[in-house]
Amino acid sequence: MKRVVSIVAFALGLAFTSCGSPTASSDSTKAAPARQILINGAGATFPYPMYSKWFDEYHRKFPNIQINYQSIGSGGGIRQILEGTVDFGASDGPMTDEQLKQAKTKILHFPTVLGADVAAYNIPGITEELNFTSDALAAIFLGKIKKWNDPELKKANPSVSLPDKDIVVVHRSDGSGTTYVWVDYLSKISPEWKSKVGMSTSVNWPVGLGGKGNEGVAGLIKQTPDSIGYVELIYAIQNKMSYGKVRNSAGKFVKADLMSVTAAAAGASKQMPEDFRVSITDSTGPDAYPISSFTWLLIPSKIEDPMKKKALTDFLEWMLTDGQSMVEALSYAKLPAEVVVMEQKAIAQVQ
Amino acid sequence: MISRRTRRKITNFVMFAMTGLCAAVAVSVLFFILGYLLWQGGRTLNWQFFTQLPAPVGETGGGFANAIIGSAKLLLLASLIGVPIGFLGGVYLAEFGGTTWAFIVRYTTDLLNGVPSIVMGIFAYALIVLPMKHFSTFAGGVALGVMMIPIAVRSTEEFLRAVPNSLREGALALGATKWRAIATVVIPAAMRGIITGIMLDVARVAGETAPLLFTAFNNRFSSPGWNQPTSSLPVMIFTYAIAPYEDWHRQAWAAGLVLLSLVLVTNIAARFILRRQSLVLRG
Amino acid sequence: MTTASPTIDRPVSPQHKFVQRLLRGDQIAHLITLIFASAIILVTALLFFELFRSSALTRQKFGFSFLMTTTWDPVALEFGALPFIYGTLVTSALALIIGVPLGLGAAVFLAELAPPRVSDGLAFLIELLAAVPSVIYGLLAIFTLIPLLRDYIAPVLRSTLGFLPFFQGPSYGVGLLAAGTVLAIMILPFIISISREVLLAVPREQREASLALGATRWETASHVVVPYAKAGIIGSIFLALARALGETMAVTMVIGNDPKINASLFAPGYSIAAVIANEFSEATSDIYISALIELGLVLFCITIAVNAIARLLILATTRKSTAHS
């Protein structure tokens, strides 16, 4: 018995001495002379595929810097940066004034990419792209339109034979910037939504199932027939889900893609406020996709550890230059040039 | 007209069959779980999983080496907290018990046992994560360690009590002081049982997810030390299972197979050790 | 070998006596084990204190109405626990309804009707079920149980029992029924193993007397043994209930995450443990976190009560059987 115990203890001890970092997918065995810096961030699932790629690429470039990002939802990102339990947060719903007041150090918003919320659906037998009017979307999520073959949906999609099935609504169960963007849009185009439900990262949904993260919502939609939900564009694409066109303020049914999302930001970027908090849903412009949004990194204006601060500010620089060249491959839109210039100046605010 | 006697015999047989069916259902669930995991997880499992870190979102490949290492670290820390308190607490109750204080301790242990695992997570978050200002392996280890305590106490106490009094009295008769008797005679006699109890305890917390969600949090990398968040097998399975990516589902199955195998192997080993133990005591 | 204590004939000071006793090691051993045992009390007290303190905001704002309100609105900061209490209770009740007959039947089979070798073997396998982690049950449930429920079981239930309000409305697969079923499977091993122990503890004389009077084995089991062990069996049910109430991961993965109260079992719901798991790290205001922690406190109190009842009942049976044997 004693021998078994000592063997086990020895094996465990071995495991621990060798528990540095195991090889990443790309092997970099050259010993990094610089100190290992680990930066923790958490927040939005909306840009998670992009951030995940960025941090991976950045780690390959600088193997001694590990940026650990956990997608727990924008609500989580805001909360944890306020508590100070992470080094940076991320959110697609900008922090409100009250939330900013709660912060012990001032929190700065840095836009990273442009993305879009799409209405993804899973209707067995329907492969065509559906058109959604803004009123229809509000009514579906309010629970007023209950079936797929409702006259209002049929009016917008005359050539599609919609089934006589109940609509299963899927929304987020966690605090989410993707939700914020969605309900921000719904509040703008539907007074009933605004008064009944309102907008925030977490709302009191009238109907529907809750999924955790963009990932959870996409998963639920994929597995539940006759369902509809809102996810960020890349999730719909990566998971080969159908998503519909939405009618914008100019009356045109627009599909979310790089062009329409960039068009949505065009107006706002000329009047970008100093702190970069702006909403671009339901923007004007004939080709704009109405449910687009910036997404932000939430960086404290004062970082104690000088090495962490340098790593973060260097990353921000990289993100605004090299990083932007990777975004379109993942169907996010690049930041407008004016915004990039403003941000590069703003990096100096991080002390 | 069936005679009463035959009817009773038929009822006997039918109920035998039906209750046997119930038992069969229960057992078949176990085989279903094992079989399904072996099927789904076995297909994907390869050496890569144990040595590589996860790939970026949406890309295939990568592994969960960080989750395995993270779980090992968490369990080590949990044992460092749970085992001493549990073991010595059990010794106290078994050997120095009988007082009111012992009664309070026992009652409190039962209370602690009933704490839902998610509440334990809240506790560790408030106690450690907030003051330290970050998620850490340490916080996760503490949450798991506190969960280990009640079972360790109870199993230690039971196995100590199971040692026949004749051994204690014999040692005392030979002139040993009480503590010597306990340390050199009683505890070794119960050692097998105590160790299996602890093994089962560790296996149980190895599978706990809820307390880790906001203590150890999660980590794409494997960071050295105890101060940083860490991935762990159960959290990784949870995150991957609810995601839409097919590749993640495959990896969740593989990780589930690994976790379940470890837990089941520990359980089976514990029971075998115990069987020999009971033979020893009887003889 | 002797541990000779220093034999001193001349009178000694009390301090010297204390040191003597100390040196003998007994006091030290007692002290050390006492300290570690007391650590348990300290930790539990700290837990309570922390829960109580951090839920102060909502306790002050809502008082007892927190337990009765159905709104869960993080925007308007209106919080009520009722949907979660409902979800927790309904899924646990469902787990018992499905699990108890199955578990008791299996326990009776293992204790009374099966040959001892078979009984031991099967009991061993069933106890292994108890070791399967919750997240793995959840993982399996998502990919096997949910499609099964949605595509096969729900339509059957709706067509046969659809007149009951429990089985009306659309079925998504996820929902209260799914959560209840998973919980039933998870508590099965507890009910079986504890009931089996309790049944085996019934004195042989009772069985022998019944058989001597000409009863069949089933009649002995159902009319003599089970009633005798009734208290213990109910105790095992309560223990299983306590376990079901606190179950987090498997429930989170299949319950649908919707804080509403619905009569239909097909509808999505939410349990206390599930909402804490989902929303805790993101609760953006202090009162939101306070509401979640108060929920945790409520759950803790419920499980304490249920556990206490369970222990009393199990104690009562073991007392009874030892008294009579």
Image (cartoon, coloured by chain):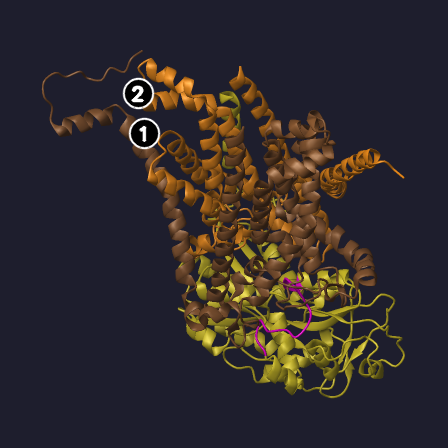
- Quadrant showing the C terminus of chain A: bottom left
User: Is A258 left or right of A48, judged from the image as shown?
Assistant: right
- In the rendered view, would you say C106 is above or below C152? above
Label annotation for residue B18: none
Which residue shows up at 13% across the image and 29% down it?
C14
Residue at mark 1:
C29
Q: Nearer the viewer, residue A97 or C313?
A: C313
Q: Colour of chain B?
A: orange
Q: Which amino acid does the dot numbered 2 rest on?
A: Thr
Residue at mark 2:
B177
The percent coordinates of residue C322 (x first, y second) are 51, 31
Asked which secondary structure carries label 2, the reply is: loop
Colour brown belongs to chain? C
Which residue shows up at 51% across the image and 21% down it?
A3
The residue range painted magenta reads A199-215
The percent coordinates of residue A267 (x first, y second) are 63, 84
Q: Colour of chain A?
A: yellow
